[in-house]
Image (cartoon, grey):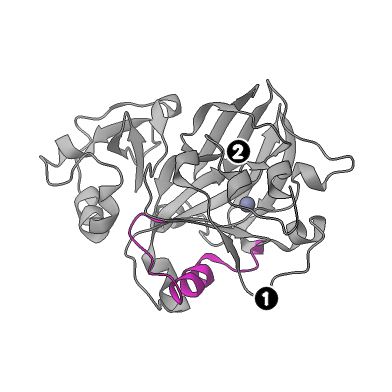
């Protein structure tokens, strides 16, 4: 199953190729509301309905019409240094516990469009984003996937000057300028990925600037895979339906290059993940 947000309303995408969508509130005769954030509290029920939903009323939909999959998540977790090669390029030792910070919800944006540069050095970080379905506390690692509604794709856009303005480094603010958290184009359930012959624990992802590949990695290289993150986070925090977990970035960020390279006005950033889709953003002057 694939879902997305179009004009602020939850849509179910055609399982064939995602090019058509039905409006969930209308197609379910009001059983489920249009608010894309509300569905996660009734995730199991929604999945049952979606499995037999009719696509008779489906209309064409393009990525350019979509908004962030989850416009108002109750909580946003982000994981730092979760790939060996990225920890190495950043000059940090491999973490023995997940490095957790937050990106503020006002920085969310959709899969297409312009992003205004912040005053500092703006960098890219392709990340797989897990969306929590059923929340809870003290979730066992073995049950981790059962609490994930699905996967989406994100960018953890980062202003490195704000991040390292003064010691110690702080992550949340420099990664939360408006538009610095694109998520989309859709949410894909793990079973949908398996049906396509993909392994939800080992997806290929990357990003390009003006057509030049900057990052390319596999989520199978995460230091703390998604079920481990669900277990470690829920050991402390109550996970809520619709929470987002940005799961960290592989190597290839601009700040790790010699010389460092950052986004400039006019640059196009294309972010991709096998089985999920593509984000496409143009950066504009501050
Ligand atoms: Zn990140």
Asked if the stretch drawn in magenta spans residue 200, the answer is: no
In the image, which is nearer the foreground, mark 2 or mark 1? 1
Identify residue for label 2. Answer: 271
Binning the other alpha carbons within 10 Å of mark 1 as few (below 14), some (14 to 19) or many (20 upward) gives few
Residue numbers of the magenta segment: 221-243
Residue drawn at point x = 24 percent, y = 51 percent: 51
Q: Earlier in the sequence, mark 2 or mark 1?
A: 1
> Residue 113's spot in the image, x, y percent?
52, 25
Query: Residue 266 falls in which quadrant of the image?
Result: top right
The front one of 218 and 78 is 78
Q: Secondary structure at mark 1?
A: loop
Identify residue for label 1. Answer: 96
> Residue 95's spot in the image, x, y percent?
69, 70
The front one of 178 and 138 is 178
Spatial distance from mark 2 to mark 1, Cα to Cα?
A: 28 Å
160 displayed left or right of 64: right
85 displayed left or right of 281: right
Question: In this picture, is 170 found above or below 68?
Answer: below
Asked if the stretch drawn in magenta spans residue 223, the answer is: yes
The front one of 282 and 22 is 282
Residue drawn at point x = 46 percent, y = 75 percent: 236
175 displayed left or right of 105: right
Q: Secondary structure at mark 2?
A: strand
> Residue 139's spot in the image, x, y percent?
40, 76
| Quarter of the image that includes the C terminus | top right
Q: Looking at the image, which residue sits at the far right?
A: 258
Does residue 75 show up?
Answer: yes
> Residue 120's spot in the image, x, y percent?
72, 35
Residue drawn at point x = 38 percent, y = 50 percent: 73
Binning the other alpha carbons within 10 Å of mark 2 as few (below 14), some (14 to 19) or many (20 upward) gives many
Query: Residue 147 falls in which quadrant of the image?
Result: bottom left
């Amino acid at each position: 199953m694939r879902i997305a947000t179009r004009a602020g309303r939850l849509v179910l995408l055609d399982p064939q190729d995602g090019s058509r969508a039905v409006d969930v509130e209308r197609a379910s005769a009001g059983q489920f509301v249009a608010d894309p954030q509300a569905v996660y509290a009734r995730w199991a029920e929604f999945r049952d309905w979606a499995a037999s939903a009719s696509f008779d009323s489906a209309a064409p939909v393009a990525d350019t019409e979509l908004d962030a999959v989850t416009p108002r998540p109750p909580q946003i977790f982000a994981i730092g240094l979760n790939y060996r090669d990225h920890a190495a390029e950043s000059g940090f030792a491999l973490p023995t516990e997940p490095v957790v910070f937050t990106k503020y919800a006002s920085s969310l944006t959709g899969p297409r469009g312009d992003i205004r540069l912040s005053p500092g050095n703006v960098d890219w970080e392709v990340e797989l984003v897990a969306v929590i379905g059923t929340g809870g506390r003290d979730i066992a690692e073995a049950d981790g996937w059962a609490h994930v509604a699905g996967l989406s794709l994100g960018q953890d856009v980062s202003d490195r000057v704000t991040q390292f303005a003064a010691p110690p480094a702080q992550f949340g603010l420099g990664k939360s300028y408006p538009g610095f958290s694109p998520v989309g184009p859709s949410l894909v359930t793990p079973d949908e990925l398996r049906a396509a012959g993909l392994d939800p624990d080992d997806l290929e992802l990357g990003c390009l600037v003006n057509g030049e590949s900057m990052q390319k990695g596999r989520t199978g290289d995460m230091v703390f895979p998604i079920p481990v993150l669900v277990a470690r986070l829920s050991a402390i925090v109550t996970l809520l339906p619709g929470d987002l977990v940005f799961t960290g970035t592989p190597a290839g960020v601009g700040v790790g290059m010699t010389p460092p390279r950052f986004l400039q006005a006019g640059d196009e950033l294309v972010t991709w993940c096998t089985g999920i889709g593509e984000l496409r953003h143009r950066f504009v002057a501050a």
